[in-house]
Structures are given as structure tokens and as C-alpha cells.
Amino acid sequence: MTVNRELFDQVMVPNYAPSSVIPVRGEGSRVWDQQGREYIDFAGGIAVNCLGHCHPALVKALKEQGEKIWHVANVMTNEPALRLAKKLVDATFAEKVYFANSGAEANEGALKLARRVALENFGEQKSQIIAFNKGFHGRTFFTVTVGGQAAYSDGFGPKPGDIVHCDFNDLDAFAALISDNTCAVMMEPLQGEGGIISATDEFAKGVRELCTKHNALLIFDEVQTGVGRTGELYAYQGLNVTPDILTTAKALGGGFPIGAMITTTEIAKHLKVGTHGSTYGGNPLACAVGEAAFDTVNTPEVLAGVKAKAALFNELLTAINDKHQVFSEIRGQGLLIGAVVTEQFKGRAKEFLVAGTAEGVMSLVAGADVVRFTPSLVIPEADIREGMARFEKAVAKVVNG
């Protein structure tokens, strides 16, 4: 069998348009394709590969657990799930954990929980969910409707009801929407897919205060920002705003699919036996790898290292921009970095990604106007410098047509 890009078009549903490059091996922040070409990975599988590729701690955890037990379903619990849950609780505001397989599922659980809490505590009139334009919360029908991008939710028939949106960082618009009938507010502390936009301190604190006033639960979607990405273990810790429910995935498994919703005992009690579940959620393989990833990231050295590496990224991107004048702004937090293209290149961010791949560096976009970088949290300085040298060649090619 010839396994190449053409095979994708023959056998896969056409909802993706993948690159012609097929990676076959990775080590640290470097990846090799079928032809043996090497790439420096500034994409990190969209903020998933928080420790790069084949990190020894993750490989060890996978191998060891792989020879013990893989799956028991939730008629029984298992040791890796209990250990990881305890570590999540000890490191955050939360007291209770629900495991899923993805960020969308963690968010689905959070939204269902919020509706259930409101129904049981206040009555069925309290069902409104407020979220933000350009937000992204997953691809289930509930989460994609809460996400503020109609292009992703239109075209599938009637949507879940009582969901409204306003602009991110517009506290006046938010204050006008929220009422005693609001059951939950879902937001990213830093919008990822929407363009790498940080919540202002004033906005985050204002949303928290209004949620408290109206007995609405504040849900932080930290699927992309969580597990060290911003230089804090979770971004809420840097904002000094504590949510009622937090969702985490992506980096939580370092590349192995896992998600979690974490909350307080008082809120969690509403998901009593039988109200929600997941066959694979909290399986021993995922939780063993997740525990190894969490332990490795949650150290002062790694978290401080994220901020130091981010400073170097910003310095090198600024130097490239001083020469080529292609970005109007470089923004983000930690190693979640967005380079906003100038008016001249509006709508053409993907051209920089494609040119970068040709030069041997992998990056991402966040919408049509932002080049996004989400590298490994432990990427060596030498790889940052080499990757940026390759990216500069790509920028020069785009500029010169």
C-alpha cells in the first residue's frame, strides 16, 4: 500500500485540507517527514505537544501503563485517574474533577453542569448562556453554538437555544446582557482561535463580579491556555480571577487525548450518578500519560522557562519585523504568540505558514490575519533561533512574492 497525501483524498472525509507533508517521526522540537526532511516545530500540534515529541517522561509512562491496564470503563475507578485528579485539585482552586477525552467534551460537560445547577437551584427560567464573539469551545453542537463563530455552527439545522454573544473585552456590552436568568458565562482567558487576544484585567474582573452578582457560573475554557502555556500553570492564576468551572485538555496529555472539567464540591454535587458520563473518560492510559505531563510541566523551572523562551520569541519576531515590516502587532502570553499581519497582507496569514513549511519550520494561524506560534514549553534556545532563522527566509519569500 502506498501511504501518501493522495490516499487521504481517497479514504478520508474531506473536512480537512492537510499539508502534503506527512510527519513520521519526532524528537523534542524537531520532526521528520516521509522523505527524511527535518522541521522545527513551532506549532506543537496546536498547543498540545507541551513537551515536544517523544519526551522520555511521557514515553516511559505510556510504556509502563501499557503493560499494566488500558481500560476498565467507569464501572470501576483506576489508580492513574485518582492520582491525576488529586494533583489537579492540589494545584488549582478546584475540589472535584471529571475526565473526558477532549476539550470539546470537557466544555460540553461544563455547560451541561451549569444548566443543571441553575435548574436545580433557581428554576427553569435561569438557562441563558453568554459567550463571546470569536470564541472557540469545540465542535460538538452545544459547544460550537456557544463558540462565537457562526461559520462553524451554521448549516446543521436548529441550534441549542438561549445562547447569546457579545464582543470580548467589551464590559459594557456584557453588563447589558447579563441578568438573573443567566446561568453561565463561558470565556477563554486568552482567545486562541479568535486571534490570540488577551482578556484585559478590567474585563476579567468585571465579568467575575457580574457573574457573582447574578448567581451565574463563570466557566473558563483553558483548553489552549492551560498546563503552562502562558507561563502560569493555568491562565486564571495570572489574571487573579477564579472561575467556578475550568476546562483543560490539549497540553494536559502532552499529545495523548485527554480532557478534564474541574470545579468545586458544591457545584459538582449536581452531576449525581447517571447524569453525565464518558466510556473512555479517565482511562488509565490517558491518565498515566497526563500525570507524567502534568508533573513535568508543573515545576517552577519549566514555568519560568516559558516566560524566558517567550521573551526570546518576541525579540526574534520583532527583529524579523524590523527588517520586513509584515506584522502590525505581536501579542499573546507565554508561548501562545500571535503575529498580526499588516493591512498589506490582510487575509494572507496562511501564506506565511505555507512558506515556513517549505523552509523547514512549522507554524499555525489564528484566523486569516494572525500567524500563531505554540511551540513546546521546553523547546531549547538553539531550536528557537534556528526556527526563527528559517521563518525569516519564509517571510522574505512572501514579501518578495
Image: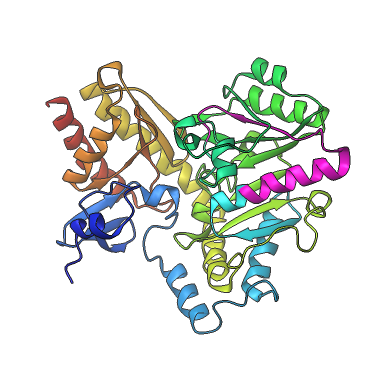
Residue 8 x, y percent position in the rendering: 25, 57
Q: Evaluate whether residue 260 shows in this view.
A: yes
Nearer to us in this view, 322 or 257: 257
Residue 293 x, y percent position in the rendering: 51, 62
Q: Is residue 197 above or below residue 275?
A: above
Residue 129 x, y percent position in the rendering: 69, 33
Q: Quadrant of residue 288?
A: bottom right
Q: Report the residue at 59% width, 22% height from top.
A: 169
Q: Report the residue at 41% width, 47% height from top.
A: 46
Q: Quadrant of residue 368?
A: top left
Name the quadrant of the N terminus.
bottom left
Q: Is residue 114 left or right of residue 334?
A: right
Q: Residue furthest bottom?
A: 67
Q: Report the residue at 61% width, 47% height from top.
A: 107
Q: Evaluate whether residue 188 shows in this view.
A: no
Q: Report the residue at 24% width, 54% height from top.
A: 9
Name the quadrant of the C terminus.
top left
Nearer to us in this view, 17 or 37: 17
Q: Is residue 392 left or right of residue 49?
A: left
**How many numbered discs sit on the rendered protein?**
0
Q: Is residue 117 magenta?
A: yes
Q: Is residue 391 left or right of residue 172?
A: left
Q: Which range is magenta?
A: 108-135
